[in-house]
Amino acid sequence: MTSMWKAALLAGAAWGVAATTAGAQQQAPASTSGDLAVEQVVVTARRREENLKDVPVAVTAFSAEQLERQGASDITNLQQTTPNVTVQVARGSNSTLISYIRGIGQQDPLWGYEPGVGLYVDDVYIYRPQGAVLDVFDVQRIEVLRGPQGTLYGRNTIGGAIKYVTNRLDDETAARIKGTVGSYNQRDLLVSGKTPIGGGFSVGGAYALYKRDGFGKNLTTGAEHYDKDVQAIRLSAEYAPNDDLFFRLAYDKVQDDSNARHGHRELPTLVGAYPVLDVYDTQAGLGNDNSVETEGVSLTGQWAASDHLTLKSITASRKGHTSTVIDFDGTPVPTLDVPAKYDDRSFSQELQAVYSDDVIQGVFGLYYMNSQASGEFDTIAGNLGLAIADGGKVSTQSVAAFFDVSANFTERFKVSLGARATRDHKRSSTFRLFYLGATRTPFQGGVNRPILQVRTNYSATRTFSQFTPRLSASYELTDDLNTYVSYSKGFKSGGWDMRGDAIATPQTVDGYDPETVDAYELGLKGYLFDRRVSFASAAFLSKYKNQQVSTQVALGNTIASNIDNAGASTLYGVEFEGQARLTTNLSGTVALGYIHAKYDTFSRFVPGGAPNPLNPSQLIPAGGQVVNVADLYGFQNTPEWTGNVSLTWRGELAGGHLAVTPMVSYRDSYQQFEQPLPLLDQKAFTLVDLTAIWTAPGDRYKLTLTGKNLTNERYRTGGYNFGVATYNNSVIGFYGPPRTVSAGLELNF
């Protein structure tokens, strides 16, 4: 109830201040206060350039300069600065992305299981989460779109979308070199450059190298743990023979050779007397080999066919390969070891027609994607004397047609209508095999031996179709204030559980259905106090249906996996973001989010003879039954409150320009899984960061000092739960970075 009152007060305060100021500004038109006016932000949330104030969507946008002031090294920084957002490194990985927006996302990065938040680089969809923890370099801005974006961005943006926009080339020759050193022997290098060739043709590129020792050690192998060894490259060529034509060919590649990340045991081991370790240490015996490689090429063409019509084509091809190991038990013995390989590839083609005049603005488009995701992993169960091979692939052909049109009914009143029709055709093959011997199976390079038992072996085909509309109406209270209401529908495609055991869970061969969300939003955004303040506020309500829930639990001599349409829920909350120029030298930002996420139903099949989860003294009848455990379960990766406050002081120092930014971010307590697990669930915590940037006269060179997590908070970002004797009490936690300090020198030519 207290949280409800806080949320109501937050929304009421935002609307009250804005309404009062709106009345005053109608009497006296707003002026721009010169150097004290906040910067107006242009975004492409609706696939066309618009002032952020005019977009009837909850959007947070960060420029390259803002990201630098925040000390952002990769896109996981968005978790600290954006309301109701979780963006972090996946459990047991170094560069796999986990994203949640307003309670909706995907924790399980297994091939074939779709993400709930869409990631886009220059409007190209990043199909798989492996290698998607993008480092921040050569970036123009990052946009976070909260709420379903199914109309313009399609399937699997049911929670929202993250847009990573890289720098465009221009007609100037320039080069940049930046070196950074810091805690844990950090050594980073960034080299970028661009130059015009002539005749409207320009080329450019950027290379980044990130190296760092581990935050901890693998005490069994002696290797660094939580280290970083990443190389990334981006190359582009642009051709603009006249004002009406533009072409861009771009290539990117990321190679992550950081050591495997095994996590920390949260329970004492049942095998041997191993010491209590620091949270960044491990005694995993599986090894340290890890390699993640992703690359892609895209061609964008744009033609201004008239003053009102622009035609655009985006063609892209991407592929990725991962070879890694995860030691789930965290001990030298192979109690629960998982070597794994993943592969993916995709081709996409999008055609857009963007129209704009004084009355109508809109985009119309067609989309096609052909993709395949495959993989294989072993589960080496030492206490059972078994090795389990899981593998398969999922091929998807997706086609869609979409539009989003806005009409100006008056100078201040606008209505937008959009819709998307999507058809996914999927083909899947899945196998699960038992082998005697707690060593790698032949699929992972182990000794060739006969199969003990075929648990799963099937192929299947399904087609999923969905219509996702969007409707919004906006009204400009003044030239500086805009309010809107909207309805949107999103969906995440269905599929099959690639870990499914057809003997333990026969229904796995049928797959699972798409999930959908109906979202309602009310927003107010704009400028206050002669544009010295910009803000955006939103209140939202989402009805989430057919939720896909992924679980893995120990069951006899196997690990039972399920991806079920287990739940339906109601989510609501409010968000507020603001920027202010307090004085000529001082500015500040604030972001606050509240979300109430509650399951209405959460269906779980309980086998006969097992205790009833709702009444443990009562046993389930023979044959089992489905039980609604909604009151016992909660949302994962969804803290009730998130907040961020920062100040930036700017001044002159030694003839140059100095900017100092302290930042404090807060995340409320949250669960790692739907079922509460006190050993893994994270309590509320606060992070304190500080960045100081000194720029020399003429911008020829720049000095940067960055401190992250200065209070050295220990907080979990993920975990695994196999806390039974069969798997040696394997409850494993993964942790965010400790306190780090770095210094950088940038030279511009």
Image (cartoon, rainbow, N blue to C red):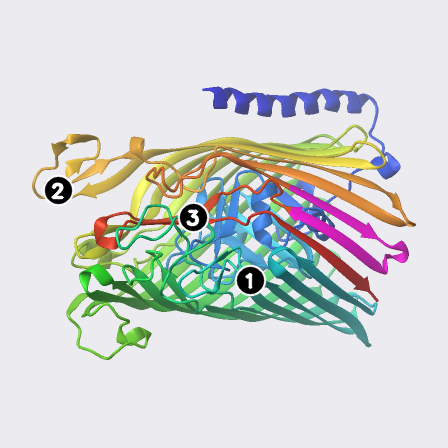
Please give the name of the residue rendered at 29% of the width and 38% of the height, measured from the top-left corner: 602
The answer, for residue 42, to whether it is visible in the render is yes
> Which amino acid is tagged 1?
Lys
In the rendered structure, which disc, 2 or 1, sits on the residue that comes first in sequence? Answer: 1
Between circles 2 and 3, the one closer to the viewer is 3
> Which amino acid is tagged 3?
Gly
Q: Main secondary structure of the magenta part?
A: strand
Q: Which residues are magenta?
A: 689-707
Foreground residue among 407 and 519: 519
Numbered tag placed on residue 718 in the rendering: 3
- Is 18 on the left or on the right of 241, as rendered? left
Q: Is residue 389 above or below residue 562?
A: below
In the rendered structure, which disc, 1 or 3, sits on the residue that comes first in sequence? Answer: 1
Disc 3 is placed on an element classified as strand
Foreground residue among 13 and 21: 13
Please give the name of the residue rendered at 39% of the width and 65% of the height, measured from the top-left corner: 325
In the rendered structure, which disc, 2 or 3, sits on the residue that comes first in sequence? Answer: 2
Numbered tag placed on residue 228 in the rendering: 1
Estimate the spatial distance between the alpha carbons at disc 1 and disc 3, rounded to whole Å: 18 Å
Report which quarter residue 432 is drawn in.
Answer: bottom left
Quarter that holds the C terminus: bottom right
Name the spot of residue 675 as percent of width and height, x first.
32, 39
Between circles 1 and 3, the one closer to the viewer is 1
